[in-house]
Image (cartoon, rainbow, N blue to C red):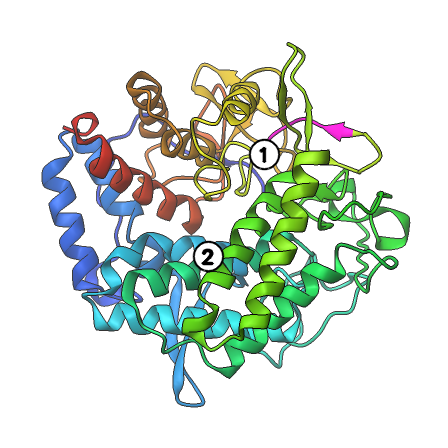
Amino acid sequence: MLSLIPARVGAQTVNRRPVPADRKFVSPAVDACIDEMKRAIKDPQLAQLFENCFPNTLDTTVTAGTVEGKPDTFVITGDIDAMWLRDSSAQVWPYLPFAAKDVALRTLFQGVIQRQARCILIDPYANAFLKDPAAMTTLKWSIGDMTTMKPGVAERKWEIDSLCYPIRLAHGYLKATGDTTPFDDTWRQAMQAVLRTFREQQRRDGTGPYVFQRKAEAPTETLALKGYGNPTKKIGLIHSGFRPSDDACTYPFLIPSNHFAVVSLRQLAAMAGTTGLSAAFAQDCLALAAEVETALKAYGLMPDGKGGKMWAYEVDGFGNALFMDDANVPSLLALPYLGAVKADDPIYRTTRAAAWSDRNPYFFKGAAGEGIGGPHEGLRLIWPMSLMMRILTSRDDAEIRASLQILKTTDAGTGFMHEAFDQDNPAVFTRAWFAWANSLFGETILDLYSRKPNLLA
């Protein structure tokens, strides 16, 4: 957990991009998009935030090279020198629309997809990896973890979404470019490992192979019951040790992540033929997706307190359910963004309203704004990511304008999005360099430009 960082409030946003010579990667297509958006966005502060944030992943976090003659791209999170499967996928995702017309950008994507496949084959239960696949972890909080740490692994927290995000990226890349170059034997073996791991973590026949314990002050950093997590009834859902926040689950059936798995398995089945995976493999993916979807409908819902139903955040299969939401994606708020539900689905609408209210213990509201946080950084801290997800899942102009205003006025003069800011004082924030939040901000603005350009004019 990082310390809170004091910063200036109210300062005019200025250009914070590195000079061209210092940028890690340059895409003419992305730069052309930035020029277009600077003309389209009439609010100069919002335009400058976009220019700073949108290219931040390319400017500062990617290292491109080759491994055995094939593209290799390592993507750090920002201020942590390691590659999370989740973050790296989300960081480069907004650049997909430009890959078809930018050869170098396509090569970069090929490298990310290839690197992620190699990481999964090192250990499908790990969430974060080192640049050197022969090195042992250099993350000070992971060094003493009581789990099977392998060379190349930075942290070994089992999170369902860690395996979903590489599928989402691969599917998005194939759809955007039609290019099958990165989908080789290594990638196919990695996808087989994904399916196998999901099946293992249904735990139909025992506890499964994954255990994790950590000596830490925060209980969210370790798993109960000798590292297996709290007990469950085996109902067909996939167990997750940790949330996408890297915090331990209270109940191991994390509902947003199981929804994400259903989407990912169906995407993997849809691209199987094109990428050289067998028809039998595709059918296995579809069968597991159907099992998980059936279990979600049977066990993932809870009373909304008003005679209706809403999605729980976590359940155990015994009838116990936890309602909350966390800003990290997958979240309940983000279900339509991930393609798990329709934005106008009545149960989602009920869930969304509850998540953005005091029914959610991690919804905060203060002088600086309102939004969702999570236990990862603690109370009172709003994550800008939740405001971006609110915009991306909204059709309400007033709601979108209000969320944009909060985002615009809580950067503390840094010109970038942060992990979290204090509900009353945005000069207190965490993570000055958090590339996922920056990429997502750029994606949010581009989404508005596509479907609601009047809100930027």
Measured Cα–Cα span from mark 2 to mark 1: 21 Å
Q: What secondary structure is the stretch in magenta mostly built from? A: loop
Residue 47 percent location from the top left of the image: 20, 37
Residue sitting nearer the eye, 204 or 32: 204
Residue 212 percent location from the top left of the image: 79, 57
> Which residue corresponds to the image point at 31% horizontal and 46% vertical from the top-left?
53
Say what amino acid the circle numbered 1 marks: Asp
> Which residue corresponds to the image point at 88% horizontal and 58% vertical from the top-left?
206
Please state if 193 lies on the left or on the right of 115 as rendered.
right
> Which residue corresponds to the image point at 72% horizontal and 61% vertical from the top-left?
199
Q: Secondary structure at mark 1?
A: loop
Q: Check if residue 323 falls in the magenta segment.
A: yes
Disc number at residue 168? 2
> Which residue corresponds to the image point at 36% horizontal and 48% vertical from the top-left?
439
Assign the C terminus to one quadrant of the image: top left
Outermost residue on the top side: it is 306
How packed is label 2: few (under 14 Cα within 10 Å), some, or many (20 or more)? many
How packed is label 1: few (under 14 Cα within 10 Å), some, or many (20 or more)? many
Q: Is residue 191 above or below residue 422?
A: below
Q: Which residue is mark 1?
A: 326
Say what amino acid the circle numbered 2 marks: Arg
Residue 443 percent location from the top left of the image: 32, 44
Q: Is residue 260 above or below residue 274?
A: above
Q: Is residue 291 visible?
A: yes
Q: Are marks 2 and 1 in contact (CB under 8 Å)?
A: no
Q: Is residue 70 above or below residue 221?
A: below
Residue sitting nearer the eye, 294 or 5: 294
Q: Which residues are magenta?
A: 321-326
Name which quarter of the figure residue 50 lies in.
top left
